[in-house]
Image (spheres, grey):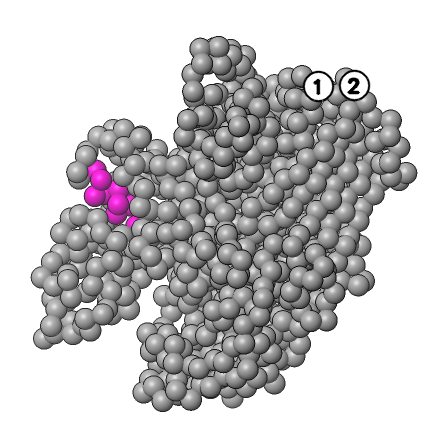
Amino acid sequence: MSAQTKLATGNVIGVAVERKEDLTLLSGQAQWVDNMRLPGMVYLAVVRSPYAHARIAGVDVTPALAHADVVAAWSGDDLAEDWHGGLPCAWLPTEDTKAPLHLPLATDKARYVGDGVAVVVATGRAAAEDAAELVKVEYEPLPAVTDPEAALADGAPLVHDDIEANRCYTWTLESEGGVAQHFEDAAVVVKERYRQNRLIPNAIEPRAVVVNPLPAAGEFTMWSTTQVPHIARVLLSGLVGIPEAKLRVVAPDVGGGFGSKLNVYAEEALALAIARRLGRPVKWTETRSEGYLSTIHGRDVWQEIELAATAEGKITAVRVRLVAAMGAYLQLVTTGIPLLGAWLYGGSYDVEGYSFECTAVFTHTTPTDAYRGAGRPEATYAIERAVDALARELGKDPAELRRLNFIREFPATIAAGLTIDSGDYDALLDRALANAGYESLRAEQAERRASGDPKRLGIGFSTYVEMCGLAPSKILGAIRYGAGGWDAATVRCLPTGTVQVLIGTSPHGQGHETTMAQIVADRLGYELDEIEVLHGDTAVVPLGMDTYGSRSLAVGGVALYFAAERIAEKAKRIAAHKLGVDVAQVKHERGTFTGGDGSVTLKEIALSAWTAHDLPDEVEPGLEASFVYDPPNFSWPAGAHVAVVEVDTETGLVELRRYVAVDDVGTVINPTIVDGQVHGGLAQGVSQALYEEALYDEDGNLLTSSMTSYLVPSAAELPEWEVDRVEVPSPTNPLGVKGVGETGAIASPAAVMNAVVDALAADGVTQVDMPATPERVWRALKEVRS
Amino acid sequence: MGNVSLTVNGVLHELELEPRELLVYVLRERLGLTGTTVGCDTSSCGACTVLLDGESVKSCTVLGVQADGRELTTIEGLAENGSLHSLQESFHAHHALQCGYCTSGMILAAVSLLAENPHPSAAEIRHALEGNICRCTGYQNIVDAIEAVAG
């Protein structure tokens, strides 16, 4: 019997119950950080560099101090003594990775537009912002470089004077025996070069932080718009020099993250240090345009990928070289993002040879870091587009070429070295082709070409596999990440019939309160409204590794499953005592324990455990259990996506007519929530392909510096999503879950861009970069026509 | 007595406002109605949408003093007699919210749309919501939730 069959599927697992968290959000009663106002609170404004690269010759805060409402103002030098080291980067992939000191306020040089150089504290937000403009900073502007390849070139301006050629690290991964022989023997080699556009995450809630100090006790409570309250507590305590036990971090309702709130930010450190200096509550809220400079960006990578293949199209080896922008400094996991994709450039295909190299480079730009998918959209994009290029080279149907190369036997140890636990890539592709109506789409495409319709039809595939559920701690250690990948959960059965569930993950839109409650309801028989899921407060839930990398269910949910098992084990012992039978004779089914002729409920047992009047001798009072789960493997969601576009060859406009997604995310706990995650990921991936791009000018000014110039799509720009699933439960964990938060964003850029190129290939266009704006498409057509 | 009187969710408020105060900050900071949120500084995202005399406006583009003598509805005032508005119910039933930060503005924009056009098509709904950005849902469930109420 497989582990999965233990689940009471069809009862509350796999059921689209409505979300527990909605009512406060729908009623305007959510607890956003920016709502908070505390007695005596002061407001922080950060003075930011208007130059991408400048020596700071002097900072004069006295004009700001003259403002009637200003409480304090400091330069970077003034606050330098408050820091124990710099802002943390938790991932140094090689021994010689260059990790420059990153102070919360710059002291010597500004290194990107938006780099903080001074702070002003006032009794109101408007006063703080007004007074920030009074601070006089003397800058000596220097030349800047914003493109990572240009930054590696001889003579490029240096972001950090002591880091040669702006090189942060070079990291390699190669299969045994390398790939040279495969390429020598190959009948066909395709070589492609792609650009991963720089993206601005745009969680709809801007970042904010409030710190309340209790000076006499040396205690601090920080409320932050963070995905990672536990990680932030560990790292900020070190940076600011507050004992970890004296620092409480709370992530109340958080309005989206997508990786941008998976970080430890300068403003959090500043708010803590300033609250300590002033002994007063401190608040900072970014404006959206400020956030475009001061909150991490995503992607910004140049990719080269080569495939070696036989004449039939069997791919034998993959060789990849990346040049990835880090930005001006390293944030929490800036360096690790390319590594999260490093194993996946062979995609869902059975290749023998694998070679990956990434060179990470400093540029005079906002630091990059995790943005939905983090390394895996990049990998999927490169391999999926290269497979289409190979199909064109061989004159083969791209779906059939994929099928020729799929991994079919699981567990599958891939050439890159990890083991995919399960999957059924043929079933996914079959379902996607059927749902899309592939044959009739090809027929329509041919008809349009034949009739000379200026609107071409394009069909694009992405048959991806990704690795998520971050992550086995031993593997993280082996690739030099600074923390573990476990997560924790506690189940506390209260004497009056309700239950508290403490989870170490920290949701910000994913619906954990509902999904986690469904697991507890399934295991222990509580009704959903009897279950209270607590999270995001280090004083309430001390142990956790937070939410990112599609890990919350695949790691945190599994921890909860095992915590519930522990409750059941203890309850069985109490039940046996009550029923007068041996423990071995007690049977447990969703909160009812039977043995002999009698039965007793978990709620009755919880009360008995609390009164403790008549417990077996060796049993402690109370009914509470915790579990810390460290996954033995990553999880491996996969899918087959089909994008259908119309491209107007006269204007270059791309319209996404249909988007068909079939995903395997393992066991589905709540199908509505899973569909919602897929929809949201697709929207972000599609807009990477068609709309979004952060652009700098040659001086390092962010040209797309507000929501008016960076296109975050509305409902009018996006299609209806046609989503479906094939469920192949993961054998790695007892829930069978794989994770779903990032699949849509990982799969869809490749599908859309393959569709765009498919539409135009007959016109001679085989390469269009993201985003496929009308201008870019029109220029690509013009080039082949001239 | 103040220089501005506003009726918000049926309650009259007399306020002394500075001319520069935006309506959204009057609601959030003067009146403590934090259900109205701020998502941008360029009138792009629509998170701060409220009803001004029954029509949706982005409350970051209206000065508090401009609302003098007028009636406002915010998300806190949408439920009646303890029952959620049909759009609030429908957003819940259709999973039309994830993080919830854009939700107040999205719902009030939808209330305004249905007052103007009680039976919009999906395409009309998408067009009408162009000024409201959601980063979580990919919009489909929002469109479905509004369509379900419109019938």
Q: Are marks 1 and 2 in contact (CB under 8 Å)?
A: yes
**Element on which disc 2 rests:** loop
Q: Chain of mark 1?
A: A
Which quarter of the figure is the N terminus of chain A placed in? top right
Is residue A122 toward the left or the right of residue A92 in the image? left
Q: In whole angstroms, how far apart are the C-alphas of marks 1 and 2?
A: 8 Å
* Magenta-drawn segment: B104-114
Kindly identify which residue carries mark 2.
Answer: A311
Q: Residue at x 73, y 53 (%)?
A: A359
Residue A435: horizontal and vertical position, in percent? 52, 19
Residue A686: horizontal and vertical position, in percent? 50, 37
Residue B49: horizontal and vertical position, in percent? 27, 52
Q: Residue at x 9, y 75 (%)?
A: B1
- Nearest the viewer among A260 and A141 is A141
Q: Earlier in the sequence, mark 1 or mark 2?
A: 2
Q: Chain of mark 2?
A: A
Does any portion of residue A497 appear in the rendered image? no
Q: Main secondary structure of the magenta part?
A: helix
**Element on which disc 1 rests:** helix
